[in-house]
Image (spheres, helix red, strand yellow):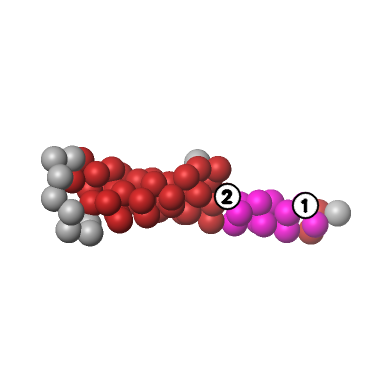
C-alpha cells in the first residue's frame, strides 16, 4: 500500500482542484467522491508506511541486541 502514496496524493490534489474550485459541471459530485476516497487511501497509505517502518526498526533493534 505504501507504494501507492504518490499516486493517491496526485489523484487527491487533482480531484480536489476540479471538484472544489466552484466549477459547475455534471460530474462534480463524482469528482468530489473520488477526492474523498483518494484522501482516505492516502491516509491509509501514509499510516501503513509509518507502521511498517516502526516494525522494521523494532526488528532491527532486536537483532542487534541478540548479536
Residue 54, quarter of picture = bottom right
Q: Position of residue 58 (x, y in %)?
A: 66, 56
What residue sits 22% from the left and 59% below the top?
21
Q: Mark 2 = which residue?
A: 52
Measuring from the top left, give residue 32's x and y in whole percent: 22, 48
Q: Can the viewer see residue 41?
A: yes
Q: In which quarter of the view is residue 34 placed?
A: top left
Highlighted range, magenta:
53-64
Give the number of the mark in front: 1 or 2: 2
Please say whether residue 60 is one of the residues in the magenta stretch. Answer: yes
- Residue that badge 1 annotates: 63
Residue 37 drawn at (x, y percent): 30, 44
The residue shown at (15%, 45%) is 25
Q: Are marks 1 and 2 in contact (CB under 8 Å)?
A: no
Crowdedness of circle 1 by 10 Å Cα count: few (<14), some, many (20+)?
few
In this view of the protein, which residue sits in the foreground, 15 or 5?
15
The span from disc 1 to disc 2 (Cα, nearest Å) is: 17 Å
* Residue at the far right in the pictured view: 67
Is 26 located above or below residue 52 in the figure?
above
For the C terminus, the quadrant is: bottom right
Percent of width and height locating residue 5: 49, 48
* Residue 44 appears in the rendering: no
- Label 2: few (<14), some (14–19) or many (≥20) C-alpha neighbours in 10 Å: few
Majority secondary structure of magenta residues: helix
Q: Is residue 58 left or right of residue 36?
A: right
| 4, above or below 13, in the image | above
Q: Secondary structure at mark 2?
A: helix
Residue at 55% in and 43% down = 3
Amino acid at each position: 500500500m505504501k507504494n501507492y502514496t504518490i499516486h493517491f496524493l496526485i489523484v487527491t490534489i487533482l480531484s480536489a482542484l476540479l471538484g472544489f474550485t466552484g466549477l459547475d459541471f455534471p460530474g462534480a459530485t463524482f469528482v468530489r467522491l473520488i477526492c474523498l476516497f483518494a484522501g482516505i487511501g492516502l491516509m491509509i497509505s501514509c499510516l501503513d508506511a509509518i507502521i511498517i517502518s516502526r516494525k522494521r526498526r523494532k526488528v532491527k533493534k532486536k537483532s542487534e541486541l541478540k548479536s
